[in-house]
Image: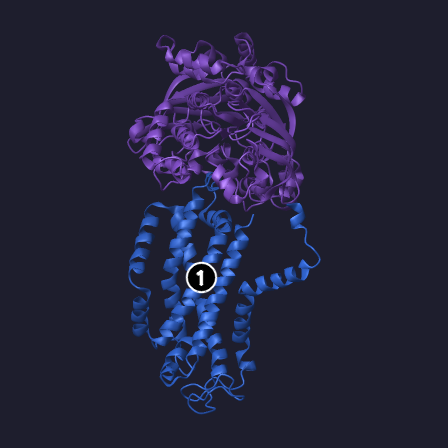
Chain colours: A purple, B blue
Amino acid sequence: MTAGPLLSIEGLCVHSATGVAIVEAISLELARGEVLGLIGESGAGKSTIGLAALGHVRGDCRITAGRIVLDGMDLRLQSTEGLRRLRGRRVAYVAQSAAAAFNPALRLIDQICEGPVRHGLMSRREAEARTIDNFRVLGLPDPAHFGRRYAHQVSGGQLQRAMAVMAMSCGPDLLVLDEPTTALDVTTQIDVLAHLKKLIAGAGTAALYISHDLAVVAQIADRLLVLRHGRLVETGPTEEILARPQTAYARALVAERTGVALAQPAQTDAASASREASRPATAVPAAILDVQGLAVRYGRQDALSDASFALAPGETLAVIGESGSGKTSLAYAVCGLVPGHAGRVSLGGTPLAPGYADRNRDQLRRLQLVFQLPDVALNPRQRIGSLVGRPAQFYFGMRGAALAQRVAELLGLVGLDPALAARRPGELSGGQKQRVCIARALAAEPDVLVCDEVTAALDPLIAEQILQLQRRLQEQLGLAYLFITHDLATVRRIAHRVLVLWRGRVVALGPTGHVLREREHPYVRQLCASEPKMRRGWLEETLARRADPSTV
Amino acid sequence: MSAARGPSPESRPSGASRGWLRFAASGAPLVALILAAAALAPWVAPYGEAQFVGGVWDPPNLQHWLGTDNLGRDMFTRLLFGARNTVTLAALATVLAFGLGVTLGFCAAAVGGWVDALVSRAIEILLSVPVLISALMVLSVLGNSLPVLIATIGLLESTRVYTIARAVARGIVVREFVAAARLRGEGLAWVLVREILPNALAPLAAEGGLRFSFIFLFVASLSFLGLGIQPPAADWGSMVRENAQAINFGLAAPLYPATAIALLTIGVNRLVDHYLAAEARP
């Protein structure tokens, strides 16, 4: 053990096989026991730096310059064998998707104990005992037997914690956490975040915490490194950056959350009030979409029961709830994708058949669905032009030059270069793909757009652009939105009215400002309190409040 | 690292010959050679397909490069014609197996429900009987004319293609772009041809190569049993059978057609592996 920083990276450059710079001249130092947050949008090079700390680069990339020194050892000079001895033991990695990181065919405990046993640090029995202890520290249910389960038998939040136990199994000096809570909803995220913080602090491990959510990193990191396009934008202590961001980009990142989360209640209300006021002037417009007593069952499990609401033309109704609350079931039932549901859905006064197959072409056209993940919603083998043009061709019989012109018009409408029509989805960024999905829905000239978590998979700044686009389209085209989301900030920004779902039941329905201000149902209170705030200490306050039964 | 990567002038020729080697190892030249032999057999063969030109099992000589067979016909000539008969039959049966298997497999996956259950159970019943037994049964009842042979093999092999096509398509129909097409009101044909097929092409093409090899070996074994292509027409499987006795006298006659079978099988498999590796690359 030598004195000085645990990890020091000097002038790191990583290039892809095609010569594109992914990371350029990044230097950082990490002391023992310190937590450094790496923040930036996707493509900023965060994960690449995180992996470099393990002496690893992704398949077709290579390190072209710089030094990576871990505890006095230059990782670039280590042999493959040397690196293997190092990984897991001195440096460990927690991936974004725990579900993809565990082997589905092996029990959790076998995978967690493999590291320490293979590195010869402890016997299988010792490793198991230690793992069970760590399960207990992380608050996993039935710690003695939890490890006997397989990855698919535990929830996403539990699996993410099990992954942290696996990373800590050898007692590493450095932990690299790559977006460990991004895939979780806010209420679960708090739990995982709190347990990770406890684990890191308890073991005195240093950590690189990678995230695109500044509010989350702020809870756990001592210092921050703001990255963009592979370059360092700003670095400093967390408080410093939150309070006085120096660069325009860091200011935008801070404002992204503070604009909503740190705002005074009066301001937030003003924002949603103005949103409410912007609703079409007609006194009580006839509902374009009317849903009565909608219920969805999967086997013996009620996913959604007795949901009723109406949607006026030009209005946005947000549906909010945690994962498993029945949000997506509601959206799919409205669109006819869930067979055998009860209740009545009418579009423009005409009742719709429960299944999409029994609805006529015009009914299908007027109700369009935009999916959560643009990657799987677009056929990878078709070109953007035919993806966007198909509804126009299918519903309106457009062909040839007229069709090409319509495609260009639609791409322009969603803020894309019409030249992209010749590309395939794989060549576009996530935000661009979501714009293509919206353009495809618009090509059908719908009355109602059902948006299923359309911004959940996007970086906050890109998500904000998509929301702005959707507001503009609503004003231009008079669309009605049924907007499914788990993010309160999104609700405040886009919704005239909000419907809160909790365990398949509607617990609140009303104007956005009113519902979020009055917080009549305990779940609405918990939801509002779980939203990460851009200040240090928020995590502890929230947990203290939650532990105190009088406030919940 | 970057210094080590720069190609030095000396290393270039060896790089080029490595490229050649890789091309040869891809199986493409081997398969092309056999296909050329199949296509050009009547023009390049030194003798007629069933022409008696020498003694029984003459050793290789200048007139008969690979010697003669059990009836004194030229071995090399019969190998060329054998390629023509066997490859044509196997190719047609493969096309039939894929046309049928892929269509049914995609339909079952896309429609689901009782259609899927019905078709899948029916196919499983066919699968549970060994292919060779079913083929022997059908061929001994219907006789072994070429169309019957192709139809039988194509039908039996389509059950294998069906299971693969259905499994691949099931992975695709649950993706949301298929839901998007259905919500638009698209018919089954559009979903099968425009949404599923382009995404299933890579695994199906790979399966196509393997299936061709299997069908080809199957034809050879049927011929070996006397139920395949009938004499005096030449095919590699029956050539092994007819000349099998020669091995007792220390003669290499049956090894020539056997080697031809092995070479085509290896060539097609190499070609498939090559294609798969190219697909796996980003």
Q: Nearer the viewer, residue B265 or A517?
A: B265
Q: Residue at x 37, y 13 (%)?
A: A547
Does residue A153 appear left or right of residue B276 in this picture? Answer: left
Residue A90 in the image: above or below residue A315 = below
Q: Nearer the viewer, residue A122 or A530?
A: A122
Residue A505 in the image: above or below residue B186 = above
x, y (%) of residue A455? 53, 28
Quarter of the rendering occupied by the N terminus of chain B: top right
Q: Residue at x 47, y 53 (%)?
A: B203
Where residue A72 sits, quadrant-wise, is top right
Does residue A266 appear left or right of residue A157 in this picture? Answer: right
Q: Secondary structure at mark 1?
A: helix
Residue that badge 1 annotates? B210
x, y (%) of residue B137? 29, 70
Q: Find the residue positioned furthest to the right.
A: B9
Question: Is residue A66 in view?
Answer: yes
Question: Is residue A304 in view?
Answer: no
Q: Amino acid at mark 1?
A: Leu
